[in-house]
Amino acid sequence: MELYEIIENDYSIGSIIEIEKTKHGSGNTYFVETNRKEYIAKINERMDFVHIYDKVQKLLNEMNLLQSCIIKTNCGGVMTSEGVVLYEFIDGDSCTILTKSQSENAIRYIRKYNKALSLIPFKIEELDVKNHWDKARSIDFIINEFSNYLIELEIDTQDKKYIYDAINMLSKNKSRITDKNKQLIHSDLGADNFIFKDDKVISIIDFTPEYNHEVYSLCQFIYWNYLWNTSNINKDDINNYLKIYNFDDDINIEKDAFYLLLLNAALYRIVGPLIDKLNRNNKDYKGLKKRFFILKEVLNLNQ
């Protein structure tokens, strides 16, 4: 069934004028224009993510943090049987690369956003373990089980060494990053998940839930918006991000422990696709070259 027909059958939102893929974001996200309003439709396989976000958007909106509300289906559900979720459209700008001003404003917003998320009741059991990315999310899996997968992977010897070195470093320091305060966070803070008006963040979208320390979400932001976009990675730039985040205030985690979480984030972005490739017997690792470079650089930052 085509998306047009699904939305027409399951929602009462007026006459559909146009449906087109969004300029940014994943290929399963669409802009929907009707004769009444505009919406975003997303094809989502994760009912657990949608239920978590439904709770989150209600509470964050009550705290005056703008979130796109889920439009309920005619049957009162948050998702159609085909996996389509319809959201309110938030008017603003999104980008693929942030300017310095946008980055700094985004970090300040993330701090406020995380403080609000810390007030939302959440249990790790609300997140299902369905795929390789869910496995890679667990530091226990990375430390205790991923080595078994690594043996089978025919990757470059040096790249494999980077992974072993990262695993060993996280294993030796596990208690320093797992015995910290954890909460619900958004773990995919790439540039295109921020909505701006005049370089000010007005909303964060595409909520990807995770249970971890609040600064792990900052690590994911730094991964996509700094580490991914530069070939000259250094602590001065990252420490400036930490300063903007108000790192010396009440975050309850040391700077060196932050860099361990950053290493965890860099390793996570390799473990997930490697398991996927192993499951599909795909031995083409060229697309992971930049991820291995980032892992090596973050290892150096932890020395």
Image (tube, rainbow, N blue to C red):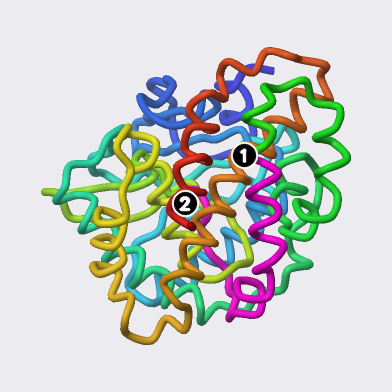
Q: In which quarter of the image is residue 62?
A: bottom left
- Which residue is label 2 attached to? 220
Q: Nearer the viewer, residue 124 or 18?
A: 124
Q: Which residue is drawn at 44% across and 25% down?
A: 16
Boundaries of the magenta span = 163-188
Whole-angstrom CA distance, mark 1 to mark 2, is 19 Å
Q: Which residue is drawn at 75% across and 37% down?
A: 81
Q: In this view, does 277 lie to the left or right of 291?
A: right
Type of amino acid at the residue the image marks with label 2: Gln
Q: Is 196 rendered above or below residue 38?
A: below
Pointer 1 local density, CA inside 10 Å: few below 14, some 14–19, many at least 20: some
Q: In which quarter of the image is residue 106?
A: bottom left
Residue 63: x and y, percent? 37, 77
Q: Which of 136 and 148 is in front in this view?
A: 148
Q: Residue at x 78, y 40 (%)?
A: 131
- Which residue is label 1 attached to? 162
Residue 128 within the segment the image draws in magenta: no
Residue 272: x and y, percent? 69, 38
Circle nearer the viewer, 1 or 2: 1
Q: Nearer the viewer, residue 190 or 298?
A: 298
Q: In this view, does 183 lie to the left or right of 248?
A: right
Pointer 2 local density, CA inside 10 Å: few below 14, some 14–19, many at least 20: many
